[in-house]
Image: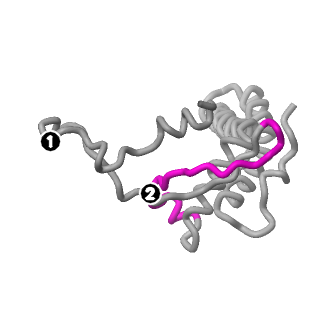
Amino acid sequence: MPREQDTLERRRLRAAEDAPPADDARMTVDTDVKERWHSVRKQDRTWQRVKLYDIGEPGWLYRWLYPRDPAKARRRVGHLYWKTFKNFILATNLLFFGLVFTALGLGCVHVCSETDRGWALLLIGGLMLCPGVYSCTILFRYVSCYRDYTWKILPEPA
């Protein structure tokens, strides 16, 4: 049995006739799952249709991101993980550390007597904050399904 069929056999839900005996109350059978198909490219450059199972309705976050088609927002969030994870990590780190250094710089300038160190932290925080806000805005608008926004706009991290 090929590997693909083996994994599909393990993922297949058990039908009602394969249900456990009635004395085992912990096991449940779910036969109301909708069937979906997905095309997968194999190593020999041919396509194979694979049966997938519906994972349920999108949650409130996806409905908030794009109310007209929450499943599209769910797919785009998946793209952030599978296609542009480096860009996502870089954008969130630049935004976070830019905010931290800016807050520390403002604290040093206004509260402490070390104004030179505070201005240096403000400069570093501002230099990190600008690309962080830009990148996170583009990624948020991509996930929110705005037209003409894609993760391909962002430069590739080294």
Tell me if mark 1 has few (under 14), some (14-19) or many (20+) residues whose alpha carbon lies within 10 angstroms of its own: few
Give the residue at mark 1.
Answer: 22
Q: Which mark is residue 56?
A: 2
Say which element carries label 1: loop
Q: Position of residue 31 (x, y in %)?
A: 35, 54
Which of 139/49 is in front? 49
Q: Which residues are magenta?
A: 43-65
Which of 98/106 is in front? 98
| Image side of residue 48 versus residue 152, left or right | left
Identified by mark 1, the residue type is Ala
Identified by mark 2, the residue type is Gly
Say which element carries label 2: loop
* Residue at the image position 76 percent from the left and 45 percent from the top: 41
Q: Position of residue 65 (x, y in %)?
A: 57, 63
- Residue 50 part of the magenta segment: yes
Which of 157/83 is in front? 83
Residue 73 visible at all: yes
| Image side of residue 60 versus residue 74, left or right | left
- Look at the picture and state if 78 lies above or below 97: below
Quadrant of the rendered structure where residue 142 is? bottom right
